[in-house]
Amino acid sequence: MPVQRDNPYGAFNFLVSLGGAQGTGDEGQIVGGFSDVSGLGFEVKYAEYRNGNEKVNTVRKVQNTFTVEDVTLKRGLIGSADLFAWLKGVRQGQIDPRPVTITLLDEARKPVGTWKLNKAQPKKYTGPTLAAKGGTEVAMEELVLCHEGIDYA
């Protein structure tokens, strides 16, 4: 797992596992890799509180609930229907939350950190923008996931 070092890890080697029928996230089990992952974060909310007999004229910050950010995944369209099958099932009312893991790899492709999204579900899908000019663009699809918590190991 993570090792303290002088140079930070690069952000270009990672694996994404969508759980379910797509496998564990090991190499060779993912149908299509993702090129971008963003939104790995959360925010803790605080309530302000002060007793009437406090000697100091300031409020305390009392920890309250927290919210997690939606996670956005992007990948080139590869013709695999497994991702769209999950989206279609959810769209038709199927409840299918999944454990989603994003694993950062070092230069030797060894895992150095894993973010686990608890009970992730598709929130938004955007298909590729198609344009008949130039022919140098890659057809990209985007998936936004909502989830109920994030863990790091």
Image (tube, helix red, strand yellow):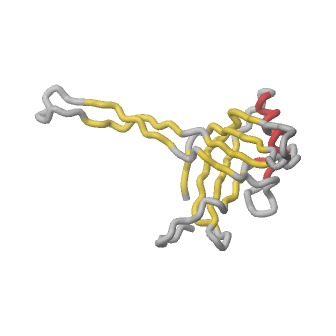
Q: How many numbered marks are there?
A: 0
- Relative side of 115 to 23, left or right: left
Looking at the rendered image, the quarter that the N terminus falls into is bottom right
Could you tell me which residue is drawn at 70 percent across and 36 percent down? 122
Q: Could you tell me residue 52's position as x and y percent?
A: 16, 26
* Foreground residue among 110 and 53: 110
Query: Which quarter of the picture shows residue 127?
Result: top right
**Residue lying farthest to the front in this orientation:** 134
Could you tell me which residue is drawn at 77 percent across and 42 percent down? 141
Could you tell me which residue is drawn at 47 percent across and 72 percent down? 6
* Foreground residue among 127 and 80: 127
Q: Could you tell me residue 58's position as x and y percent?
A: 19, 33
- Relative side of 134 to 115, left or right: right
* Foreground residue among 96 and 81: 81
Could you tell me which residue is drawn at 68 percent across and 38 percent down? 121
Instruction: Relative to 56, say whether 52 is above or below.
Output: above
Query: Which quarter of the picture shows residue 61?
Result: top left
Q: Is residue 21 visible?
A: no
Looking at the rendered image, the quarter that the C terminus falls into is bottom right
Q: Could you tell me residue 115's position as x and y percent?
A: 59, 53
- Relative side of 46 to 72, left or right: left
Q: Is residue 37 visible?
A: yes
Q: Could you tell me residue 57's position as x and y percent?
A: 15, 32
